[in-house]
Amino acid sequence: MSSETVDPTAVEQLLPELIALIIEALNLEVSAAEVDPDAPLYGEGLGLDSIDMLEIALVISKRYGFQMRSDNDDNLKIFASARSLAAHVVQHRTT
């Protein structure tokens, strides 16, 4: 399934759950409403670092039933924003 065929409605429905999961996993002191789904996750935006990204990948793997790989060439695109991460989860989730 290519990124062009991701159901935008499914992405929108997953975003609040995914943002809440990230906030909970990283103990961030922000509310889900404060997170811009199109803001960068890494560096600017939420200001996360590589360790945070590994933690997010782990909780996503557990929650949605697929393995995220650190050597995936698309990781910069996948983790660009909560919205792009949600689109990736929609494409690959098994649970």
Image (cartoon, rainbow, N blue to C red):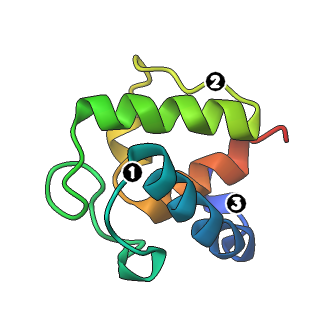
Going by the numbered disc 2, the residue's amino acid type is Gln
The disc at residue 46 is: none
**Which residue is farthest bottom?**
33
Cβ–Cβ under 8 Å for marks 2 and 1: no
Residue farthest along the left direction in this orientation: 44
Q: Residue at x 64, y 75 (%)?
A: 12
Residue corresponding to mark 2: 67
Residue 1 seen from this side: no
Residue at coordinates 71% horizontally, 74% vertically from top-left? 13
**Left or right: 75 in relation to 88:** left
Please, is residue 51 above or below residue 79 in the view? above
**Circle 3 residues within 10 Å: few <14, some 14–19, many ≥20:** few
Image spot of residue 4 (x, y percent): 61, 60
Q: Secondary structure at mark 2?
A: loop
Which quadrant of the figure has residue 75?
top left
For the C terminus, which image quadrant? top right
85 w.r.t. 32: above or below = above
Disc 2 or disc 1, which is closer to the eye?
1
Task: Report the front residue among 31 and 43.
Answer: 31
| Residue located beneath label 3 in the image | 5
Give the crowd class for mark 1: few <14, some 14-19, many >=20 residues within 10 Å.
Answer: few
Mark nearer the N terminus (2 vs 3):
3
Of 88 and 24, the residue lying toward us: 24
Give the residue pinned by disc 1. 27
The x and y percentages for residue 84 are 47, 57
Residue 38 screen position, x and y as percent: 37, 71
What amino acid is found at the position of numbered circle 3 in the picture?
Thr
x and y percentages locating residue 61 in the rendered image: 64, 31
